[in-house]
């Protein structure tokens, strides 16, 4: 398997809602392995399939030493206070912006065998679950920013070296 390159903000695949995966598809194990290899790179908390150019509902995570994946994830619960947390994204490299996130999140999905997977947590895990699920819904975190922060973020992104490259 391999570490895949990350699609950057502006790539249409990042704005498209991802299709559900079909359990039993022989290509799925390869996708999961690529997601796991890609998320193990230093400084990565999560990678959505759309970030590697695959429009399917799957993501990998690497939080507090725990590495895994989930297929067809759905956020089934968020709770606590919505907080502004500094957040970045591999698809928006070099930027961090205060992003509204719930303090607790719970995601349910499946593994390669079709068995139920439940991921939940607070802190970075809650943030990663919300962030990666947003990717699969075709939403980048900069689109969820408060209006003034979003305007400033877009101004900064448009001046970056990688924008429209």
Image: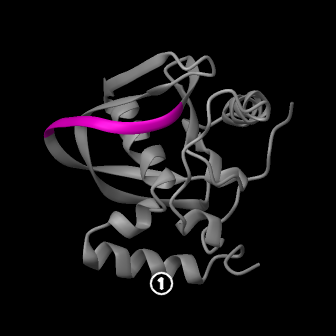
Residue sitting at x 70%, y 52%: 54
Residue extending furthest left?
81
Q: Position of residue 63 (x, y in %)?
A: 50, 25
Q: Quadrant of residue 143?
A: bottom left
Q: Position of residue 32 (x, y in %)?
A: 70, 30
In the image, is residue 162 above or below residue 134? below
Residue sitting at x 56%, y 21%: 111
Under tag 1, what secondary structure?
helix
Label 1 CA crowd tier, 10 Å (few <14, some 14–19, many 20+): few
| Left or right for 78, reference 141 | left
Nearest the viewer among 108 and 143 is: 108
Q: Position of residue 10 (x, y in %)?
A: 62, 75
| Left or right for 90, reference 74 | right
Colouring of the image: one colour
Q: Quadrant of the C terminus?
A: bottom right
Residue sitting at x 37%, y 82%: 151
Residue sitting at x 45%, y 36%: 73
Predominant SS along the magenta part: strand
Residue highlighted by disc 1: 155
Q: Quadrant of the N terminus?
A: top right
| Left or right for 17, reference 79 | right
Q: Quadrant of residue 59?
A: top right
Which residue range is magenta in the image?
71-80
Nearest the viewer among 114 and 41 is: 114
- The number of numbered discs placed on residues in the rendered structure image is 1
Q: Position of residue 95 (x, y in %)?
A: 52, 62
| Left or right for 106, reference 125 | left
Residue 77 among magenta residues? yes
Residue 63 among magenta residues? no
Nearest the viewer among 15 and 144 is: 15
């Amino acid at each position: 398997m391999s570490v895949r390159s990350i699609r950057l903000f502006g790539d249409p695949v990042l704005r498209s809602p991802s299709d559900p995966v079909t359990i039993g598809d022989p290509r799925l194990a390869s996708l999961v392995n690529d997601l796991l290899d890609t998320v193990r790179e230093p400084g990565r908390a999560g990678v959505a399939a759309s970030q590697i150019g695959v429009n399917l509902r799957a993501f990998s995570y690497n939080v507090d030493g725990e590495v895994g994946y989930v297929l067809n994830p759905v956020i089934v619960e968020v709770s606590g206070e919505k907080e502004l947390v500094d957040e970045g994204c591999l698809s928006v490299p070099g930027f961090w912006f205060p992003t509204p996130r719930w303090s607790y999140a719970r995601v349910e999905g499946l593994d390669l065998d079709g068995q139920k997977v439940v991921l939940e947590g607070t802190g970075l895990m809650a943030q990663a679950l919300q962030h990666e699920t947003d990717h699969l819904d075709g939403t980048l975190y900069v689109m969820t920013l408060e209006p003034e922060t979003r305007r400033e973020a877009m101004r900064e992104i448009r001046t970056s070296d990688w924008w429209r490259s």
